[in-house]
Amino acid sequence: MAPIEDAALRSLLADLRAIPSGREEKTNELENLIDYLEIAAVAAGEKPSHLQGQGRRSRGFMHAIERVAGVHGLLVMRTPPVPTYYHRAPHYDPRFFEWERQRDRESCAREGHVLWIYRDRNLESAIRAAVEGEADVAEVLGYPPCCVRENSELGIRLAEARVRGYQSQYGATDVEDFIRLATQDARVEITRTDWPEFRHVFPYVQFSPCSHCAESSSSPAAEVNWAMKRLATRLSPAFQRAIDKAAKAALEVREAKRRR
């Protein structure tokens, strides 16, 4: 597929940044800027696809993104939200695990649609597999598989800790107990060591790097980060500086919360 000229990429970025944001949109400026950068990266052929709407987005904003992407020759697809990805089954009753997965699928079906933006039509089957929970998002979003796998593991460990809490704090003994407590959204005290620690060390990506990637400037996650930074600088030094400024502000907020 032929590369898109930088002038066309700059035009795409300008149109994206011109979309007005309402009060119901994301309040995290860094996330907004990285959304635009990711769409530009798809157009540039540096990223397979971008997923829009998995977080907080209004219908009007989604329609505007879809329109701009189409005007600039990108392909778009609306699907239900992506369910939780499990790289392995949790270590508890498989019947409860299947109940959880079904509830997740039903919740996604009720939430409306997300928007995929991509260039290669051959990617559509992989997108659908991710939406069905049959594959992780690493391939379709261009995320390092090691990071996707570790973050899946962190989520699974949290789910296992919650079930242990059902057992130790509520006396749950069988799948019916687990389902009842989950349906009631029963509060469980979980130790700090069981809470997942998501890292924010690379400002130009939206995924959380795994422990190995976070510690190396030449890791797969770091390479994605540097590639995205190079693209941002190439398209607009002012845009790149805006991302750096937003990343610094987001870091200060996280540090303030940690000190509380």
Image: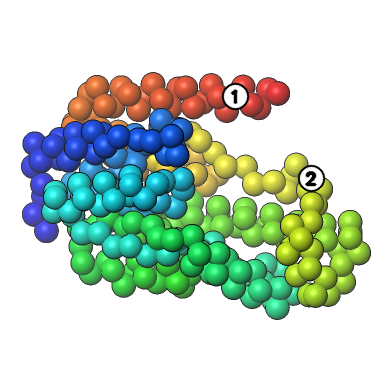
Label 1: how many Cα within 10 Å (few below 14, some 14–19, many 20+)? few
Three-letter residue code for mark 1: Glu
Q: Is residue 123 above or below residue 242?
A: below
Residue located at (68% from left, 22% from top): 259
> Which secondary structure lies at badge 1?
helix
Q: Is residue 230 above or below residue 135?
A: above
Task: Name the image quarter holding the C terminus.
Answer: top right
- Left or right of residue 67: residue 113: right
Which residue is more in the foreground, 204 or 61? 61
Q: Residue furthest bottom?
A: 95
x and y percentages locating residue 147 in the rendered image: 48, 51
> Which secondary structure lies at badge 2?
loop
Q: Which image quarter: residue 61?
A: top left
Residue located at (55% from left, 69% from top): 106
Q: Can residue 46 be seen at all in this image of the molecule?
A: no
Q: Which image quarter: residue 26?
A: top left
Residue pointed to by mark 1: 255
Q: Is residue 31 above or below residue 79?
A: above
Q: Which image quarter: residue 142?
A: bottom left
x and y percentages locating residue 149 in the rendered image: 52, 58
Task: Name the image quarter holding the N terminus.
Answer: bottom left
Disc number for residue 191? 2
Residue located at (57% from left, 42% from top): 198
- Count of residue discs: 2
Precedes in sequence: disc 1 or disc 2: 2
x and y percentages locating residue 136 in the rendered image: 45, 64
Which residue is more in the foreground, 115 or 47? 115
Three-letter residue code for mark 2: Thr
